[in-house]
Image: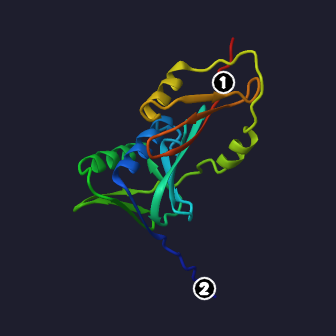
Amino acid sequence: MTTVQETKSVTDTVTVENKAILELLEGAITHAHKDKDLHALNTVQLYNTGEGYLVARATDRYRLIEGKIEADGSLAPSLVSLEDTKRVIALVKSNKLSRVTFNRIGDLLTVSVTGSSITVQIIDGNFPANFDELFTKNNKSVATDKASFNPAFMADYGKIAGKGKPVTVIFTGERMPMVIEVKGERVEWRVLLMPMRVI
């Protein structure tokens, strides 16, 4: 007896405002793992929450970021390589007046802006699924004597914050992740930063 398995192809479309997706992707790539040795982390994960938002997540193991913008449509969780995310950013920058459409069919994601488009391959990998749990576990501030962090990481928050908007650091305990509150122009951000071990 032969068993035939049906493979269901993912078909999703989501549309977003140009300036918002630029801010979202440019912020997210600052936290993606830079090397290809961890291919699942050398990505930005995009998905639609079903509540009218497109979410972008990235992590390099030392920090993680999640941002969301208003969007129409739906998009299943899709890992886009850092290299391809930069290609998408370049495409969006080429036409700053149009809305941007993401169309996923199976493991291909096509990004379109007024007559121009690129298609990228979705990365197959195990992206951390417990972002929400990490934020929930680290949502209470505590007094602490000191905390050490990589200043290069902190510089990225200046790039993400909206003009004239503050960056707030919330300490959650000794050797515990710090919560970074960053207010963008069009993006709602959640950020965790791991402390450095002092030797």
Q: Is residue 175 left or right of residue 34?
A: right
Q: Is residue 3 above or below residue 97?
A: below
Q: Position of residue 190 (x, y in %)?
A: 59, 41
Q: Earlier in the sequence, mark 2 or mark 1?
A: 2
| Distance Cα–Cα, label 2 vs label 1 | 55 Å
Name the amino acid, label 2. Answer: Thr
For the residue pair 157 and 152, the one nearer the viewer reads as 157
Judged by depth in the image, the label closer to the viewer, 2 or 1, is 1
The residue under label 2 is 2
Instruction: Please determine whether, in this image, residue 10 is positioned above or below residue 81.
Output: below
Image mark for residue 195: 1
In what quadrant of the picture does the N terminus appear?
Answer: bottom right
Quadrant where the C terminus lies?
top right
Q: Is residue 176 above or below residue 67?
A: above
In this picture the colour scheme is: rainbow
Whether residue 33 is visible, yes or no, is no
Residue 23 location, x and y as percent?
41, 43
Residue 138 sits above or below residue 127 on the image = above
Query: Which residue occupies 45% across, 39% down?
Result: 27
- Residue 120, how many percent across, how many down? 37, 56
Near mark 1 (Cα within 10 A), the count class, few <14, some 14-19 or many ≥20, is some
**Residue 51, located in which quarter of the rendered image?**
bottom right
Identify which residue is drawn at 55% across, 52% down.
125
**Amino acid type of the residue that numbered disc 1 sits on in the rendered structure:** Pro
Horizontal and vertical percent position of residue 87: 32, 47
Q: Disc 1 on helix, strand or loop?
A: loop
Residue 24 visible (yes or no): yes
Q: Residues within 10 Å of mark 2 (few under 14, many from 20)?
A: few
Q: Is residue 131 left or right of residue 115?
A: right
> Which residue is outermost to the top?
199
